[in-house]
Amino acid sequence: GESVGLHLPTLSVQEGDNSIINCAYSNSASDYFIWYKQESGKGPQFIIDIRSNMDKRQGQRVTVLLNKTVKHLSLQIAATQPGDSAVYFCAENSGGGADGLTFGKGTHLIIQP
Amino acid sequence: NAGVTQTPKFQVLKTGQSMTLQCAQDMNHEYMSWYRQDPGMGLRLIHYSVGAGITDQGEVPNGYNVSRSTTEDFPLRLLSAAPSQTSVYFCASRSDRGLYNEQFFGPGTRLTVL
């Protein structure tokens, strides 16, 4: 089946810099996308979502951008903090029969002091 | 609210043993799901339920059974454990208020099958 993937397995950024985590998806029928944060030993935690009728959505220190033309999703984290260190997953819900999400493999965000 | 709870947190089984992973939520959510997470891979859907009495298969259902007798509980059963089922298992729930809403995850159960 179609899958969601991430470009980089590890991203290292300096504390205080902005982080950009990318995601490519291949299911053109997907109409809802979510970013999750997973800290070590914990379950995924919702960060922000976006529907396919939007190309940008902002939250507190986070922004998600959706480019449907190239099937690309990104998560921007402003002024990265040590607490942002985690694995970040993008996920899609194509709206089909399975009431679940298709997850990418994840990007490990490492914060350098 | 406790949110989504899972028990046990850790479990070691021998090949062929059976066990049930428990999942409960106190948010009155209709939708519940089970995922497994393996190293280097994203979460994969095992089974899901859209309400009490209704279950369906996800991407990787083989070797697992589920039931949904109440809104709160969604246990996952391994009838005959295999080493390939060594993984971290996450239960999740969300409300039925529209397709686009947040899914809450439990803390996970780390299962090792020897």
Image (cartoon, rainbow, N blue to C red):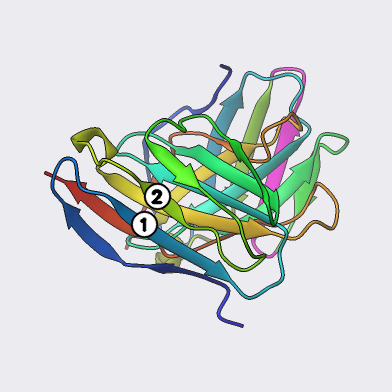
Q: Residue at x 19, y 49 (%)?
A: B112
Looking at the rendering, the stretch of residues picked out in magenta corresponds to A60-70
Q: Residue at x 69, y 45 (%)?
A: A64
Q: Is residue B111 left or right of B43 when viewed as pictured?
A: left
Query: Magenta includes A61?
Result: yes
Residue B72 location (% of width, % of height): 62, 68
Query: Magenta includes A78?
Result: no
| Residue carrying label 1 | B20
Label ID, residue B77 = 2
Residue B58 location (% of width, % of height): 56, 34
* Along the viewing direction, whichever of B17 and A34 lies nearer the viewer: B17
* Furthest residue toward right: A53
Label ID, residue A63 = none
Quadrant location of the C terminus of chain B in the rendered image: top left
Residue B107 in the image: above or below residue A4: below
**Would you call the spot at circle 1 few (<14 residues within 10 Å), some (14-19), or many (20 or more)?**
some
Q: Is residue A30 left or right of A35 when viewed as pictured?
A: right
- The secondary element bearing badge 1 is classed as strand
